[in-house]
Amino acid sequence: MRQLHPEAIAAIQSKALFSKAEEQLLSKVGSTSQPTLDTFQDLLHRHPDAFYLARTAKALQAHWQLMKQYYLLEDQTVQPLPKGDQVLNFSDAEDLIDDSKLKDMRDEVLEHELTVADRRQKREIRQLEQELHKWQVLVDSITGMSSPDFDNQTLAVLRGRMVRYLMRSREITLGRATKDNQIDVDLSLEGPAWKISRKQGVIKLKNNGDFFIANEGRRPIYIDGRPVLCGSKWRLSNNSVVEIASLRFVFLINQDLIALIRAEAAKITPQ
């Protein structure tokens, strides 16, 4: 370990699991508060013996956001699943399969159709890659627990467990993409989305710098545990937890860019 580069040592130490004592201290930070890096830096100073020596304020903030996303903070309560809303798991589905009916027969017609479909899909993928610059929302896969870094074009980030959606325009639509229905944020990339409407909702940035989400689907959208019904809207804050049909996301705002937008709006508004 002593012969490794300091950056390699720091990368290894950053992957250390959080202890119960660390999570207990983090859970005391309120879910409705807007903690900054200074908040978590102060937590490190006040409890140096409780936290692992390699912990940073940014690492604490990222883990706190994860705990909030899964309702693990002291002031949060877990929402019960509605009755009759059980999702069939893999083991249950496997038990329903009759192995005797499974046959491994070669079908030349089917293989030809699959080959043609494969070529067509590859051609569509190439076309989509050429249109990347036109997209309003970019999707990144999440490979670690580090907090996302904003650039000067990303207004906000909707971060899930598997992917994160980068909001690049003032208005984006959320839902389930189909062959005949294109959507800015395809929630099926995060997980099972068969219960989500094709157009579930819209996230919009107002001129004053506030974000609002409007529900246009049949199912309610939960914001920090509060249901937003069809036809209603709700203001999104930084670190808000957005839950749609059991898919949970954390809404993160690019505070620096929004501050610039508010400053420009203040200049335009007549005194």
Image (spheres, rainbow, N blue to C red):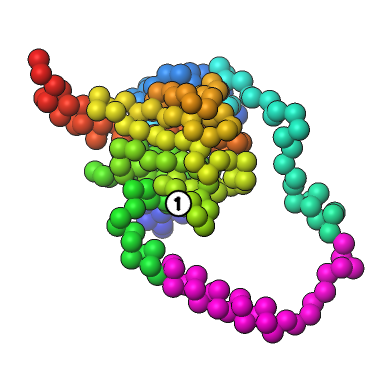
Which residue shows up at 84% across the image and 59% down it?
97
Question: Disc 1 residue type?
Answer: Gln
Say which of 138 and 41 sits in front.
138
Say which of 20 and 239 sits in front.
239
Q: Quadrant of residue 211?
A: top left
Q: Quadrant of the C terminus?
A: top left
Count of labels shown? Answer: 1
Q: Position of residue 227 (x, y in %)?
A: 55, 23
Give the left or right position of residue 33, taking residue 264 as reference. Answer: right
* Callout 1 secondary element: loop
Give the left or right position of residue 71, taking residue 139 as reference. Answer: right
Say which of 159 and 230 sits in front.
230
Q: Position of residue 203 (x, y in %)?
A: 39, 34
Q: Quadrant of residue 73?
A: top right
- The residue pinned by badge 1 equals 182
Q: What residue range appears in magenta?
A: 98-125
